Amino acid sequence: MKTEIIEIRKLLASDKMVLTNGEAYGKEIYLGKFDKEENWSEITEEEYQAKLAEEQEEALI
Amino acid sequence: MSKTIQGKWQFNKVLDGFTFTRDDGPGSMFINEDVNFTSNSNSYTYFEICGVYTTANTSYMDYDSIDNGPIYAGGDSWLLGEEYRTIDFGTDPQEVSEEFYNFFVANARLILQTIAEKLQVITENEQRVFDAGKKAEYDAFWDEFQAKNGKLGARDDYQGGFYGVGWNDETFKPKYDMNPSTCASMFVSVQITDLDASLKQCGVTLDTTNAERVSKMFFWASKLTKIPTLNCTNVTRGNYFEDAFNTATKLETIEKIILREDGTQTFSGAFTGAKALKNITFEGVIGQNIDFKDCTLLTHESLTSIINALQQYNGDGKTHTVTLGQANISKLSEQEIAFVTQKGWTISS
């Protein structure tokens, strides 16, 4: 029998900040098996909202 | 039992086997025989219909005193052997036997009535004419709308086919099955509530098996609540599922989305603003980033379907993200979260 420990790595954004890897956004991130913490960085809520608005505007075109 | 009859009736056909009696003695002959009564202008002619006798002066159009029944014969048209003959019962209701009444109903049509009766008939006819007109209009529109190169129902390019708020449960009544080669922007801004029910009500199907594009297919379809199964295994062009259900704010159920097995299809903005979505089932493979953060009402069953469809990655150097939103993450157990991350997917809130 072989025992494997599965690690769940969780990133939490600072207050009023949002985590992003340039494509996805979130305040709480569960890293995939091959994902790395350094792939993620924080942006402000305002920047996040502006990004969402921009994407939705593009959708309307 | 007696009935009443009035107005001017015109026979629908030349009557055979009609018995009549002339003043020069009873006789029997067919009314459609060529009989020239006008030569007998000073005499009366007796008609017998179901046992009721009538008289008619053959010299004039309208007619005459009745000896044995309240019937006036429309002289000329009756007697000159024309195909359609008339009898005028006058404007007051006349009591006649049921047999007699039935004879007229079966063989003639009322052509001159009281104003009240006319209005009644007009009302009844109006609905029939309206319905007939609507049906003709419906056929003409959908025959043209769903045709391709003159072949009825053969339209396959439905890009923007039902684009706009004018399409609703009343106006969306397709006549033919739809088998589109493209569904891009097909239902943008429609006001249809239940596509599945609408299609069933019309007795038609929407088969997307051959569709290469579905981007913006239901974009801003803000009243839509249910979508039937979409077979998207041939969707390979046009940014795949980009904005396919974007801002379909009342959409609760997508019966099933059948994806390709190669995981190449992308989902940019596909479910943005689909905040009522509860039920969704995937078949095939989700291989690209996908975002359900606005779909906070997803059932656990739907979430299970999503995470089971995620492609198994074994370290291809890329980050693969499924954005579920905090509300949905909280519905998952640690084991389920671990199951996703072990498949090589990052979960984002």
Image (tube, helix red, strand yellow):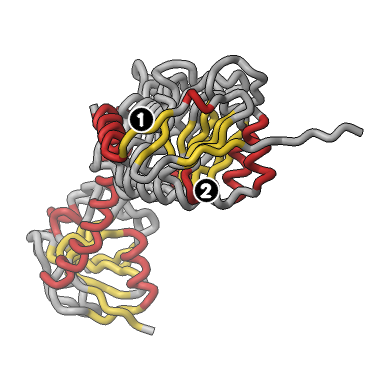
Q: Is residue B99 left or right of residue B332?
A: left
* Res. B153 in view: no
Q: Mark 2 points at which residue?
A: B328
Q: Does B56 appear above or below A58?
A: below
Q: Does B327 appear above or below B213?
A: below
Location of residue B141 by image quarter: top left
Location of residue B73 by image quarter: bottom left
Which label sits on residue B216? 1
- Camera-nearest residue between B126 and B216: B216
Q: Alpha carbon of mark 2 to alpha carbon of mark 1: how far?
A: 24 Å
Q: How crowded is mark 1: few (under 14 residues within 10 Å), some or many (20 or more)?
A: many
- Camera-nearest residue between B20 and B1: B1
- The picture places residue B265, in percent across and down from the top left corner, at 51, 22
The count of marks equals 2
The outermost residue toward the bottom is B1
Q: How crowded is mark 2: few (under 14 residues within 10 Å), some or many (20 or more)?
A: many
Q: Do labels 2 and 1 share a chain?
A: yes
- Which residue: 25% across, 47% down? B83
